[in-house]
Amino acid sequence: MLDPELLERITARRAELDELEEQLVKQLAEVRAERDELAVAERVLERMTAQLAEERSSARPMPGQVAGRAVMLIPHREPGVEEDALPWDYQRIIAAVRQATGPVMAREVGEVVGVDISVKAKLEPLRSKLVKLVDRGWLRKLPDGRFTTRL
């Protein structure tokens, strides 16, 4: 004859194990669901990263047309937009302003970048580029008309 107390203990233990199995099955289902969600999130992140990289590369200045001539558009200064996004002559202008010991006039920048400063008609396009760099946030223009890098 079987001991009733042992049968009761076995039955109780079996019930505990059944309950534990249910909890583990539920927990395993939750873990698998979260893994699936992470896989989806990873795919979305990869897609968004590729899309952002494409948008950033297309943010480079694109040649435009003015009076039938190709011109470069000057981007606004924003996080992620570096000076190398500017056309070469604008990069030289910023470098000249940066090299100066303080704020500079357009004439002083012209001397550094090789513009004939004795001819006003040759200095005005440089002044226009300086102002464009100010408008786009790359440089700062002081009230006395001198230019400096942004702080």
Image (cartoon, rainbow, N blue to C red):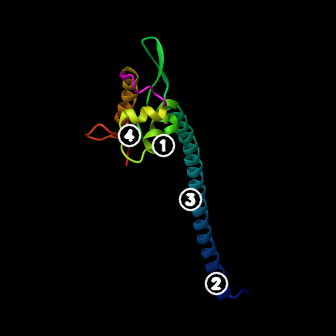
Under mark 4, the amino acid is Leu
Q: Mark 1 sits on what residue? A: 80
Q: Mark 2 sits on what residue? A: 9
Question: Residue 86's spot in the image, x, y percent?
Answer: 49, 33
Q: Which segment is the magenta one?
A: 114-120
Question: Residue 36's spot in the image, x, y percent?
Answer: 59, 50
User: Is there CB contact under 8 Å for labels 1 and 2?
Assistant: no
Q: Is residue 11 left or right of residue 119?
A: right
Q: CA distance from mark 2 to mark 3?
A: 31 Å
Q: CA distance from mark 4 to mark 2?
A: 84 Å
Residue 116: in magenta span = yes
Q: Mark 3 sits on what residue? A: 30
Under mark 3, the amino acid is Glu
The answer to which of 32 and 150 lies nearer the viewer is 150
Q: Mark 4 sits on what residue? A: 139
User: Is there CB contact under 8 Å for labels 1 and 4?
Assistant: no
Q: CA distance from mark 1 to mark 3?
A: 40 Å
